[in-house]
Amino acid sequence: MRVATELFGVTFRNPVLLAAGTCGFGQELADVLDLDSVGGFVTKSVTLEPRAGNAAPRVAEFSAGMINSVGLANPGLDAAKRDKLPWIAANIRSAVVFVSVAGHTVEEFCRLVEGMDGEAGFLGFELNLSCPNDARRGGPSFALDPAAVAEIVAGCRARTQRPLLAKLAPDDPDAGATAAIATDAGADGLTLVNTLPGLLLRAASGAPELGAGGGGVSGPALRPVGIRALRAARARTHLPLVGVGGILSPEDAVAYARCGASLVQIGTATFADPRAGPRLAAGLERWGRERGVAAWDDLVAGPAAVRPGARMPGRTETREAQWRA
């Protein structure tokens, strides 16, 4: 099965990406796997200022996955530009890179995009509108506020011609409506979903398993939630979709494709096996070959306007040359 796919004016070697927060800035996994063996990756979320993250313990396992509350730990905008993006530009050959950005206000999102827009080595931005682990934000995530989604996406759109992925929430009661709002505001694609807010307690004491209390649920338990949200989004937008949540096997990835995902991201699987991404990509090729499927693109459900290889008018004709410069 041909697993290469064309989106946003570039070719992805395969549809498998490593999800934000699970592979650092790539450098952290470079000695363990060939990053160019996957279609791409999304960096840790970058904030304006350095973040130390939440109190330990930050991760706990349970029978159907894991829960984490890392708290957006990252070096901040200036250090990311000075140290992280140059390493990506110098070492990543074919993997397509998106930089995740996270702000506490609309203005912060816009400043982050504007601040990194001129740097080399990455294709576009993933707007982290739905992180459940940011104690400084308080209240619901931006993704659950339709006005905030529109304002952030539109503000970032005005500051870059790079592709923008809006990452939406798993607990959105109307993911389709939010997808439509992000589409109208100028997103180039949508990522569904982020981790699901949850809580684990120690049986003996009743104390939370995580130092920050609650956290984000990921792994197999998240898969039905992610598929539901992605299917709802597919019904309301023509944009390419990126499916995330509980993907461990080729069958899991195909299930997302059947609901409209042109790309998939894996996260928790990488913690269990750092080479899970390349293994999944190879497994997809075998899965299709055994079933006589010619191409990954043939599995992706969606409107004709998002046919495989479609380019966004006016923004992508020279995209690959620009971001690899």
Image (spheres, rainbow, N blue to C red):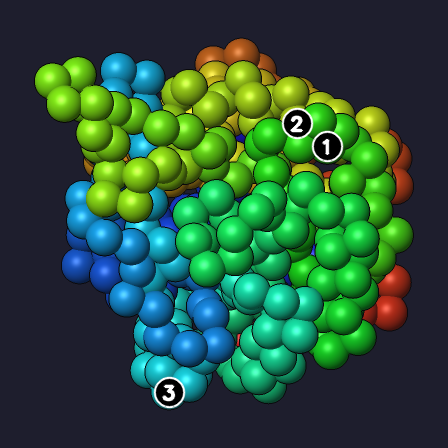
Q: Earlier in the sequence, mark 1 or mark 3?
A: 3
Mark 2 → mark 3, Cα distance in angstroms: 37 Å
* Residue 254 visible from this viewpoint: no
Tags 1 and 3 in contact by the CB under 8 Å rule? no
Residue beneath disc 2? 229
Left/right of residue 212 with respect to residue 117 in the rendered view: left
Element under disc 3: helix
Residue 310 x, y percent position in the rendering: 79, 50
Image quadrant where one finds the C terminus: bottom right
* Residue sitting at x 18%, y 44%: 57
Q: Which mark is residue 82?
A: 3
Residue 9 x, y percent position in the rendering: 71, 61
* Residue 212 visible from this viewpoint: yes
Q: Residues within 10 Å of mark 3 (few under 14, many from 20)?
A: few
Q: Nearer the viewer, mark 1 or mark 3?
A: 1
Q: Residues within 10 Å of mark 2 (few under 14, many from 20)?
A: many
Q: Nearer the viewer, residue 128 or 10?
A: 128
Left/right of residue 225 with respect to residue 287 in the rendered view: right
Task: Residue type at mark 1: give it.
Answer: Ala
Residue 26 x, y percent position in the rendering: 33, 62
Image quadrant where one finds the N terminus: top right
Q: Earlier in the sequence, mark 2 or mark 3?
A: 3
Q: Nearer the viewer, mark 2 or mark 3?
A: 2
- Look at the picture and state if 57 lies above or below 246: below
Q: Residue furthest left?
A: 204
Tags 2 and 1 in contact by the CB under 8 Å rule? yes
Mark 2 → mark 1, Cα distance in angstroms: 6 Å
Task: Residue type at mark 2: give it.
Answer: Ala
* Residue sitting at x 50%, y 48%: 131
